[in-house]
Image (cartoon, rainbow, N blue to C red):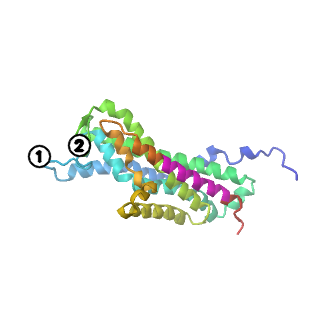
Amino acid sequence: MTTATGYAPNRTLPLRVEFVRQFKRRRTLAMFGLLLALPWVLVIAFQIGPQRGQEQSLRISDLATQSGLNFAAFALSVSASFLLVVAVALFCGDTVASEANWSSLRYLLAAPVPRDRLLRQKLTVALAYSAAAVICLPLMALLAGTLAFGWDDIQVPVTGEVIPALDVLPRFGIVIGYALVSQLVVAALAFLISTMTDSPLGAVGGAVGLWIVCTILQAVEALGVLREFLPTFWNNAWLDALQPELDWSGMTKGASVSITYAAILIAVAFRRFRHKDVVS
């Protein structure tokens, strides 16, 4: 079997080309526009909403206007369980399925781009955009909250204890890092479904739907300790990073569950795609 002169498998489908292709798509720009606009919408909602009296509960929503850090924590808490899930599922679930839907997948492989490399490049770009989505929302929320409510110490939900802002700021990096890790399951699940269908909407909807099912099962107390094996069970473990005493136990367990599921799902995606019939 002869090889074309100048052909190098490891130079096919460069990351730069894939990054540009994905960036130019309207769904990418629309999703980032939504994520960047949401904190400002929340600020407006708090500004025009009725002001509370002297009595104030210690829920995270009631403390949102105490400082920029409080507001950023609130914005992340209301978006992590659905909006960020949709964003990650969109970037990772649409990447391969859209190529199959456009009938361009067979031409990419005929270029020829090795199948493993095609998946690796697609997954790398999808994870990069997913990470950017998860990072940009809390950072924009921190900016919007600081401009609207000032830079002040953070008040811890439930306990009401106050932690100096400069002490919490490094922990906010831990919060964002854990949010990234917790979304790996969504990314891997959407990517796996994307290799199994030529419907981008089906891949995105399938991943989001299964995540919702896990969220519902998490509320079934009869499952006992089995709930701890659900990826959604540890979704809010990042709140432990904002306590007076930093507690790693919940985040460690959540990260372990998320990484394990993600590794298995991605391995299955690669194994299945190697033998997939892309012609029909």
Q: Is residue 30 visible?
A: no
What amino acid does circle 1 point to? Gln
Residue 37 placement, left or right of 277: left
Q: Nearer the viewer, residue 234 or 58?
A: 234
Q: Nearer the viewer, residue 218 or 33?
A: 218
Q: Secondary structure at mark 2?
A: loop
Badge 2, how many Cα within 10 Å: few under 14, some, many 20+? few
Q: Quadrant of residue 244?
A: top left
Q: Quadrant of residue 5?
A: top right
Q: Which mark is residue 54?
A: 1
Vertical side of 9 occupied by 220: above or below: below
Q: Which residues are magenta?
A: 256-271
Give the residue at the far bottom of this rendering. Answer: 280
Give the residue at the far top of this rendering. Answer: 166
What amino acid does circle 2 point to? Thr
First reached walking from the N terminus: tag 2 or tag 1:
1
Quadrant location, the C terminus: bottom right
Q: Secondary structure at mark 1?
A: loop
Cα–Cα span, label 2 and label 1: 18 Å
Q: Which mark is residue 125?
A: none
Query: Where is residue 173 drawn, in percent x and y?
Result: 41, 37
Residue 21 placement, left or right of 11: left
Q: Nearer the viewer, residue 33 or 274?
A: 274
Badge 1, how many Cα within 10 Å: few under 14, some, many 20+? few
Query: Where is residue 199 drawn, in percent x and y?
Result: 57, 66
Residue of label 2: 159
Determine the residue positioned at 39% across, 52% down: 80
